[in-house]
């Protein structure tokens, strides 16, 4: 039997993206419409995956949720508060490793808490908890140069979670990892959601990753990005699968993968762009 857990998410809406558009102005004055009329919502403790072809605006949406970009139109709300810029209630993890080379794992995880004025004793205790959560306790005194790529991403996850963000934003966080490390990191993310109240919005190009991790998948059209489909990953039937290979053999998995591949193919450009 597959290793499963029933979703703990509630009907409480954590994040609302409503009719959002983004237009970029190039150096020559030309305007590029990156995304258009994008709307979706995310529940508390939900793992929402943004999926779609390259250049569809997924990462732009994620950066706007983070407050790193400003929507040209529409609104974004977190806990019913308008998103107007970066804030500690949103933590972001990128594909590139972002640890400070001169700090140990422990000090890296403590860094954000130190900046936010958390007392030394409290932040040391909290750092220990989050380092244990990402299974790096034996390496707490190691420096990033002494860690593998997967370990460095675990440090980034622990450091971000230690700041207790309302939403964890992830932009292709495992894209640079080898296949084995990648699925280990994916399984780690499932365990983190089962042991915390974390809400995740993640961008990926990987269909298999989206189906394994996502409670819901928001699928974007090609440029300019709009939403083609938005719904739960049906074959899981309201459960999270803790082991990657268990998900791959579940009834309905192959059909779900083929459906998303068909969506991807439908978004291929018909002319040179």
Image (cartoon, rainbow, N blue to C red):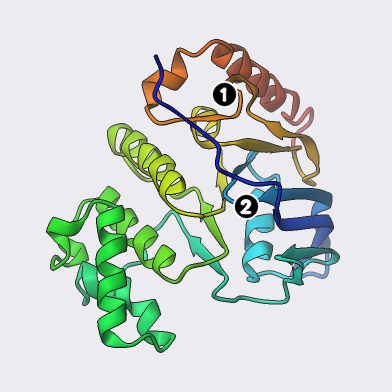
Does 273 appear above or below 42? above
Q: Residues within 10 Å of mark 2 (few under 14, many from 20)?
A: many
Crowdedness of circle 1 by 10 Å Cα count: few (<14), some, many (20+)? many
Q: Which one is nearer the viewer's eye here, 115 or 258?
A: 115
Quarter of the image holding residue 188? top left
Q: Earlier in the sequence, mark 2 or mark 1?
A: 2
Residue beneath the point at 45% across and 12% down: 249
Is 189 situated left or right of 269 in this image?
left
Across and down, in percent, residue 106 comes to 22, 70
Residue 89: quadrant of the picture: bottom right
Q: Nearer the viewer, residue 215 or 263?
A: 215
Which mark identifies residue 14?
A: none
Task: Look at mark 1 in the image and give the residue it sits on.
Answer: 236
**Residue that carries the numbered disc 2 in the rendered image:** 44
Q: Are marks 2 and 1 in contact (CB under 8 Å)?
A: no
**Residue at horizontal 63 percent and vertical 57 percent from the top:** 62
Q: Quadrant of the N terminus?
A: top left
Q: Secondary structure at mark 1?
A: helix
């Amino acid at each position: 039997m597959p290793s499963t857990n029933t979703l703990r998410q509630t009907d409480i809406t954590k994040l609302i993206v409503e009719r959002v558009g983004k237009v970029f102005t190039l150096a020559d004055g030309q305007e590029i419409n990156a995304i258009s009329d994008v709307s979706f919502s995310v529940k508390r403790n939900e793992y929402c995956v943004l999926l779609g072809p390259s250049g569809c605006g997924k990462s732009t949406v994620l950066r706007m949720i983070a407050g790193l970009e400003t929507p040209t139109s529409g609104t974004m709300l977190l806990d019913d508060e308008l998103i107007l810029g970066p804030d500690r209630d949103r933590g972001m993890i990128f594909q590139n490793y972002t640890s400070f080379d001169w700090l140990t794992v422990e000090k890296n995880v403590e860094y954000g808490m130190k900046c936010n004025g958390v007392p030394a004793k409290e932040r040391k205790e909290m750092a220990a908890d989050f380092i244990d959560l990402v299974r790096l306790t034996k390496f707490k005194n190691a420096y990033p140069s002494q860690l593998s790529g997967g370990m460095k991403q675990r440090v980034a996850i622990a450091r971000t979670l230690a700041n207790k963000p309302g939403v964890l934003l992830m932009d292709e966080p495992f894209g640079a990892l080898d296949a084995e490390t990648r699925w280990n990191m994916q399984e780690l993310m499932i365990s983190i959601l089962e042991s915390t109240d974390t809400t995740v919005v993640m961008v990926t190009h990987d269909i298999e990753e989206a189906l394994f991790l996502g409670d819901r998948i928001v699928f974007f059209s090609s440029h300019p990005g709009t939403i083609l489909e938005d719904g739960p990953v049906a074959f899981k039937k309201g459960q999270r699968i803790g082991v990657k290979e268990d998900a791959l053999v579940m009834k309905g998995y192959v059909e779900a993968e083929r459906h998303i591949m068909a969506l991807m193919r439908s978004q291929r450009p018909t002319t040179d762009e």
